[in-house]
Image (cartoon, helix red, strand yellow):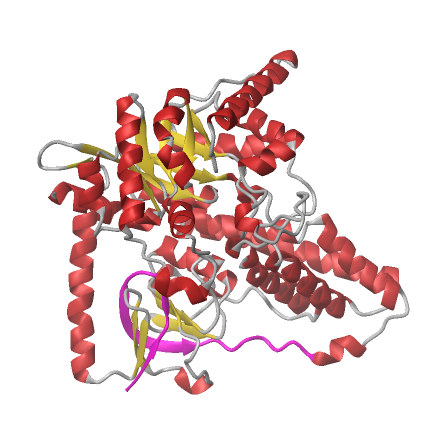
Amino acid sequence: MNSYKGTAVSAGIAQGTLLYLDAPVQPESFKDVTVCDAEAEITRLLGACNTAVDELMGLYDRALQSSGEDAADIFMVHSMMLQDDDFLENMRERIRGTKCCAEHAVTEAAKQFAQDLAASGSDYIAERGSDVADVSKRVIQILQGKDTSCTGNTEEPVILIADELSPSQTLMFDRSQLLALVSRKGSRTAHTAILARSLSIPAVIAPDIPLSQELSGKRCIVDGLTGTVTIEPDEQTAAQAQETQERYAQEQRELAALKDKEAVTSSGQKVRIYGNAGNLEDIDAVTASGGEGVGLFRSEFLYLGRTELPSEDELAQVYTNAAKKLGDRLLVIRTLDIGADKTAPCLPLEPEQNPALGIRALRLCFECPDVFAAQLRSILRAAVVGNVAVMFPMIIALDEIKYAKECLKKAAEQLEAKHVPYAMPKEIGIMIETPAAAVISDILAKEVDFFSIGSNDLTQYTLAIDRQNERLEKYCDVHHEAVLRLIELVAQNAHKHNIWVGICGELGSDLELTERFVRAGIDELSVYPGAILQLKKRIREL
């Protein structure tokens, strides 16, 4: 018996037989192959890309039927990558400039694409590099005349194990054939992990597992709760895993029954449970988990990893889609929060000695008024179809709120002048992320409809600890009394002025603090989708 500790990226427990998927070999000889007719090679390349797009759309249709919209959207993203003008032009220029073969052009362009994504500063955007690799392998296989349309065929359900699993590899198998996923590479934000969660399949990333073809056929336990993978377990370990599996299944049934229930304490105090979302996929997860709305829609994902700004129409379309998905439920859109640990090539961010204390969030928006105005207009356009609120981050002074509201009013006037349909947000709020904002929250409350406490930054700035610095982790007490007292002060000042207050940082899902937050009068908690049902359960137990 061998056990390996890794990272759980999709919850659940499974026992079964392993099936090892070897990575397709990428011949190094590509780099030495040259062509005489560059234009003919480009035609060959584009033909392979078109074939790949057709295959991906076929996978999209299959995923839509078997796994839902979240899973299907992965293949839509893949097909869009192969239609990206910059990516295609990169490959064409390589063939024209060096007379390299199409296979080598795809390989090198994909590497560059992945590097650009990695430089975005966003883990979510950086993880799309694995999707670029998956897409490029598909194109290369087509160029080599290899079959990419095979489907998994096993006599019994299996646990897939590989160095890195791609979404297309996973969907080669019917859901009934998959028990769990194990890989050495990946992360929670990788598309394969997203797919696993949408399929309710346990998944673990275990970097230390030794891989070989000999793994196929061996028994395995995948614990997506603890992040443990056990190969060839003994009888006692298998029996314990079975008990845990049954207990987990019962807990999930009990939690599922709370999906449409309200989070109300035994004394009748109601707390609204919302979800945080970084993209449209997350909104689906929020509603599927019983979230009553989205308390934090991070708008910066539309800017990260791009050399050109998104258009107003593109922004409006995404926000409109988000509002439509939620129907009558509240959608709180946070205006652009770029800077500090998040950079975007499309925005004029200069290197700063202390970026966490520099031009970020609302400060950047004030420095780039055209960018801010386009986003505000797109939010106003989306407000026509849904229950939309706007929230300004990194506020430290009353004048900042007033100026942001003036910008919003001006954006409405611009739409009015062009006869573009719009609606004012149902509510205007701010994030309380600094001690300055917390201390004067009684003054700030007079200008807004709600507060949302960003506990991650509030902790960072209160404790003077850079949360990106791993060496400081031992000093970062997330339960520090100073932070908790600031939260309580903000709640008191909000209620004095008859506005509601929520928490949208990680502390919102900390079950050890739930009772204290309820006592403090916190009206709303916005958490990652996977924490919604557990939080409802905890509040209903108080």
At a point 48% along the width and 49% down the height, the residue shown is: 72
At a point 60% along the width and 68% down the height, the residue shown is: 147
Q: Quadrant of the C terminus?
A: top left
- 389 and 41: which is toward the camera: 389
Residue closest to the far left:
267
- 357 and 298: which is toward the camera: 357
Regarding residue 329, the answer to whether it shows in the image is no
- Residue 83 image offset from top left, x and y in percent: 68, 49
Q: Is residue 401 left or right of residue 273?
A: right
Identify whether 526 is placed above or below 177.
Answer: above
- Residue 525 image offset from top left, x and y in percent: 29, 39
At a point 30% along the width and 27% down the height, the residue shown is: 494
Identify whether 41 is placed above or below 523.
Answer: below
Q: Is residue 430 left or right of residue 256?
A: right
- Residue 540 image offset from top left, x and y in percent: 14, 41
Q: Quadrant of the N terminus?
A: bottom left
Q: How many marks?
A: 0
Q: Is residue 542 left or right of residue 119?
A: left
Q: Quadrant of residue 353?
A: bottom right
- 101 and 426: which is toward the camera: 426
- Residue 342 image offset from top left, x and y in percent: 55, 50
Regarding residue 108, the answer to whether it shows in the image is yes
For the record, the magenta segment spans 1-27
Q: Quick check: is 17 in the magenta stretch?
A: yes
Identify whether 236 is placed above or below 185.
Answer: below
Q: Quick check: is 438 in the magenta stretch?
A: no
At a point 16% along the width and 74% down the height, the residue shown is: 240
